[in-house]
Image (cartoon, rainbow, N blue to C red):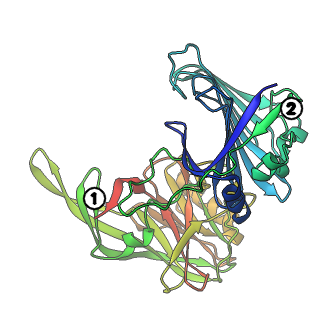
Amino acid sequence: MTTVDISYAEGWDSATRRAHRPLSAAGARRRDTAGEPYVEIHREPGRAEPVEVYLVAWADLHVGHWMYDELGRRTREFDLRLLEPDRLFIREVVERRYSSPDQPDRARDAWLTRLTLTPGKKAKHVVQEQGEFGSSRHGWSDLPEAQWWIPRAAFGVGAADDQDDSRAPGPDEPESEPEPESQSEPESEPDGPPEPDGAPEPPTSLWRPPRPRRPEFDVQELLRPGNRFHHDDWGELTVDRVEDVTTVRVPSGRLVVADPLYPAAPRELTEPIPPGEYRLQTPVLVGEGDYHGEGFPVQEEPLLRLLISDEPAVSWEMGLGAGEDPRLLLDGEAYGFVTDAAQGAFADASGWDPLSGTFRRYYDGEGDHGVEEVRTGTLRVADRKTGGDLVTFCTVGDGAWSVWLGRAASGDVVSVVVLTDWLSDYQPM
């Protein structure tokens, strides 16, 4: 039985563990109703560090719940997602244990366990016995699915107003907690003064709701001749031209972007395109490299664009495959096709089996089977029965590569883009 002081703020500085722009309860309630992010801080009287912090962002379908020890170190984190109107899904639970008082907050060598949940799948459990520097064990948790959800009403300023004890225990927590003897909150805490002109930027450690990975800048900038970029390896590069590679026929209007050698099922985009034949293009960036004082020409082609329409793309979004839910992405994550051969392909979905089968036989040295090399690293396979094509391309490495859809002001998809290089190496000048 302890007394808990509750306060609110617009944000939370995770480095200093301090509130950013305090709010009154009324101010927090307004932000809660509007879906704007805010935080709820719980403290015990006489203790400088918080006991727990709730990070509420209804418009982003997210609630974070962080717990702290008496030294101000984060010991447990819950990432909760509003997948249904009245309840939150436990997407991830991270727990840390510190071996000594000298270990800093979120020490990289702290013992760590991570539980990751996905609706309809088994719960993945990872234990890192000495953080990222030690051994780890991977397995599947038998946590009952009934414990994967928490009522929405348990979170937010309304829950504190009601002095509600309905915050359900998470994994490995006791089934019930003693109800606080009393709760208090400031009655007239300011909603934060307006920022003066020239006020410092918010701290970089300020909490924000998790965001899926996005391109570091508008990829359209790489498709405008004359634009200049600084490349981490080559220095200044200039977009010299946008070059037509070949065309891709998609008579079904269903587009696959996948590695034809990868054994998994092809990743067909859920967003259809009008049936037709489309130009496959790449921007050509040129510059000059230097090796021990001697210059040499540099040419980079960091993306491929399937041009659906000549209308300009004004926004970009992640291209999704079947069963992919962007609400479940953790911070910085993205969906994409997987390759262990540093390649992918654009293909008509209705002819994927014969198209990819022909390509695999060619790759295994069983004859060309009509496979055409349209340029170095780019092969084209045609299917006479469906009239569709498969056109390959190279990436700079293995792993998962995302697909981005460019939309016109009308909302129509006008471009399908794969970034085949690390876009973080390019900085607009």
Disc 2: CA contacts within 10 A as few (<14), some (14-19) or many (>=20): few
Q: Residue 14 occupies which quadrant of the picture?
A: top right
> What SS does tag 2 mark?
loop
Closer mark to the observer between disc 1 and disc 2: 2
Residue pictured at 66% horizontal, 44% vertical: 7
Alpha carbons under labels 1 and 2: distance apart: 58 Å
In the rendered structure, the answer to whether residue 379 lies left or right of residue 199 reads right
Q: Which residue is mark 1?
A: 230
In the picture shown, does residue 357 fall above or below 275? above
Residue 152 can be seen in this image: yes
Q: Which residue is mark 2?
A: 179
Q: Nearer the viewer, residue 417 or 21?
A: 21
Residue 118 can be seen in this image: no
Q: Residue 136 occupies which quadrant of the picture?
A: top right
In the rendered structure, the answer to whether residue 2 lies left or right of residue 134 reads right
Disc 1: CA contacts within 10 A as few (<14), some (14-19) or many (>=20): some
Q: Position of residue 217 (x, y in %)?
A: 43, 64
Asked whether the residues under the numbered discs 1 and 2 touch, taking CB atoms below 8 Å apart as contact, a structural biologist would say no
Amino acid found under the numbered disc labelled 1: His
Residue pictured at 80% horizontal, 52% vertical: 158
Q: Which one is earlier in the sequence, the residue at label 1 or at label 2? A: 2
Q: Nearer the viewer, residue 8 or 418?
A: 8
> What SS does tag 1 mark?
strand
In the picture shown, does residue 77 fall above or below 224? above
In the picture shown, does residue 93 fall above or below 227? above
Residue pictured at 67% horizontal, 66% vertical: 269
Q: Position of residue 385 (x, y in %)?
A: 69, 76
